[in-house]
Amino acid sequence: MCSEGGDRPSILLVEDTPVNQKVALKMLNHLGYQADLATNGLEALHALKQRLYDIVLMDIHMPQMDGLQATKAIRGELPHADQPYIIAITAYATRFDRAMCMSAGMDDYLSKPFTVEDLKLALFRYSGQQ
């Protein structure tokens, strides 16, 4: 799925920590992007059923439904054409953690704390998939 007319991709940030929400939203804004917010995996699933998003920035550890469970649900429930590009955002940074995210169906991985440049590169990798 991609945005119409060459517009910026639509982004859903899924993050439960208010400070991390503010930092990520500010970074996105600095790069010229806007994002909607969900605070857990259940809210993300609901949001994706209401609107198609190009990119989901998915925290891993959240209450109610974590990012791994939410990603598996997204991959299982949404039609292929509606699948977003899912970027894991997590404080866990081992190879095992990365592999776990990828096996859950995520497309990319950012370890916290990430910089604006890290985020910019992840968004660039998304554009290379289009």
Image: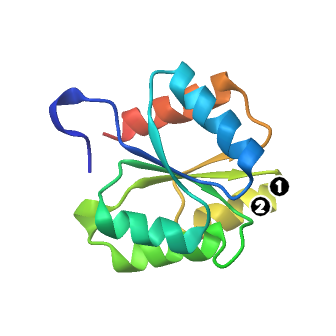
Whichever of callouts 1 and 2 sits on the residue coming sooner in the sequence is 1
The circle drawn on residue 53 is none
Task: Count the marks.
Answer: 2
Tell me the residue that label 2 is attached to: 97
83 w.r.t. 7: above or below: below
**Are the residues tagged 1 and 2 within 8 Å (C-beta)?**
yes
Q: Position of residue 72 (x, y in %)?
A: 52, 75
The three-letter code of the residue at mark 1 reads Tyr
Image coordinates of residue 3 in percent, x first then y, are 25, 40
Residue 112: x, y in percent? 78, 43
Name the residue located 36 percent from the left edge and 42 percent from the top edge.
10
Residue 111 appears anywhere in the view: no
SS at mark 1?
Answer: loop
Circle 2 sits in a helix, a strand or a loop, which is it?
A: helix
Identify residue for label 1.
92
Residue at left offset 55%, top offset 35%: 122
Q: Look at the image and tell me whether residue 45 can be seen.
A: yes
Is residue 6 rendered to the left or right of residue 96? left
The quarter in which the C terminus is drawn is top left
Q: Residues within 10 Å of mark 2 (few under 14, many from 20)?
A: some
Tell me if residue 49 comes above or below residue 22 in the rendering. below
Type of the residue with mark 2: Asp
| Depth order, front residue of 49/123 | 49
Instruction: Specify the farthest residue to the left.
Output: 5
